[in-house]
Image (spheres, rainbow, N blue to C red):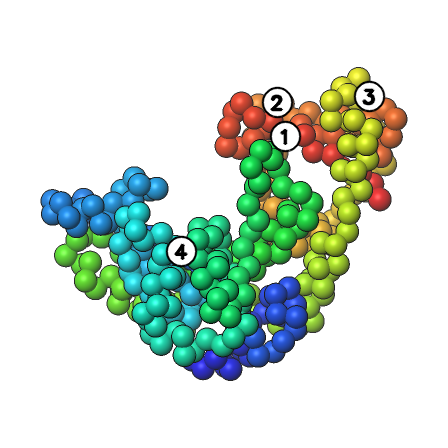
Amino acid sequence: MSHEKFTRDHTTPTARTLFADDQQETGILVLDGTYIYLQKSSHHHFQKQTYSMHKGRSLVKPMMIVATDGYILNVLGPYYADGHNNDASIIKHVFKTNADEINTWMHDDDVMVVDRGFRDAEEFLKKLNFKVEMPCFLKKGAKQQTVDEANTTRLVTKVRWVVESANGRIKQWKFLDKVVANHYVPHIGDFVRIVCALVNCFRPPLINDFGNDDIGKEMIEKAQLDNHVKIYVEEHNLLRRKTVYKEVDGATELIMFPRISLDHLRQITMGIYQIKLAKRYTDAHQEDDNYALYICKDRPDLLRVKMQSRHSSSRCYHLWLGVR
């Protein structure tokens, strides 16, 4: 597919607004490596090359290049899974060897949306006159990101999720979802490309809304706002003061808080992922009977919620919600 057709037909308005300043000719690519699991090999050298310390098993890694609407532009590789073939080193190899003539296809100022695994290739890609959009890293000694860093990360996540869904689509073929016999290794790249071609041809786009980009504009506008609740909590030392809160004993005490429809909630969260996650959090907390909500005595429009981490049983988070 030509660069012009790709940018015209497979770039969502939201992605163009967020990362391309509404430039119609700018290509926006989402890149990520996926995994095809293999049998353990009795060939020692091959076993070393395919064993992933991260996953703890043998695999090879195809590199997926996906459009912002979920269209799979290309699949490169597969590559070995040892420490010499992380996402950053793979993408460097791709451009140094001009795999599938990618250097010719891409234009200056094209945007690559990637995850943190590409951090060691960021400067390399920028020297090639590409723009790189990546989630922010947590600074040394910090416990959470700043407001600006969190907002920047959300903008990237809004666009980058399509590559994860595209990876999930190809794993719906049972052959690729199971452990593949090692005698198929020379053909795995062809198998993945065939499956991706079938997905492009017969499955609907992950995003098919190419109307007005109200969401992208709203996200940029909100990303520039200060977090007034955070400022108030820190200025009044509400992080440590426990006596200023009382536990919510009934719905009547939450009369200050608006009842939000599901559609309005989707607009606030800019998608459905957080809504799905909220339901799972709620189910887990109700099962353990530890869903604690507190109202600030000084400000009845300020709510504090205690949430248990879904990853660690020893870690809890405190959230504050205020009515505008």
CA–CA distance in space, label 3 to label 4: 49 Å
Name the N-terminal-most of marks 3 and 4.
Answer: 4
CA–CA distance in space, label 1 to label 2: 16 Å
Looking at the rendered image, the disc whose residue lies closer to the viewer, 1 or 4, is 4
CA–CA distance in space, label 3 to label 2: 23 Å
Residue in view at x 47 percent, y 52 percent:
119
Name the N-terminal-most of marks 3 and 2.
Answer: 3
Q: Amino acid at mark 2?
A: Asp
| Residue highlighted by disc 3 | 244
Q: Amino acid at mark 1?
A: Tyr
Name the N-terminal-most of marks 1 and 4.
Answer: 4
Q: Amino acid at mark 4?
A: Ala
**Residue 22, how many percent across, how many down?**
65, 73
Looking at the rendered image, the disc whose residue lies closer to the viewer, 3 or 2, is 3
| Residue highlighted by disc 1 | 317
| Residue highlighted by disc 2 | 289
Residue in view at x 48 percent, y 66 percent:
127
Q: Are marks 1 and 4 in contact (CB under 8 Å)?
A: no
Is residue 170 placed above or below 281 in the rendered structure?
A: below
SS at badge 4: helix
SS at badge 2: loop
SS at badge 3: loop
**Residue 149, how many percent across, how many down?**
64, 48
CA–CA distance in space, label 1 to label 3: 18 Å
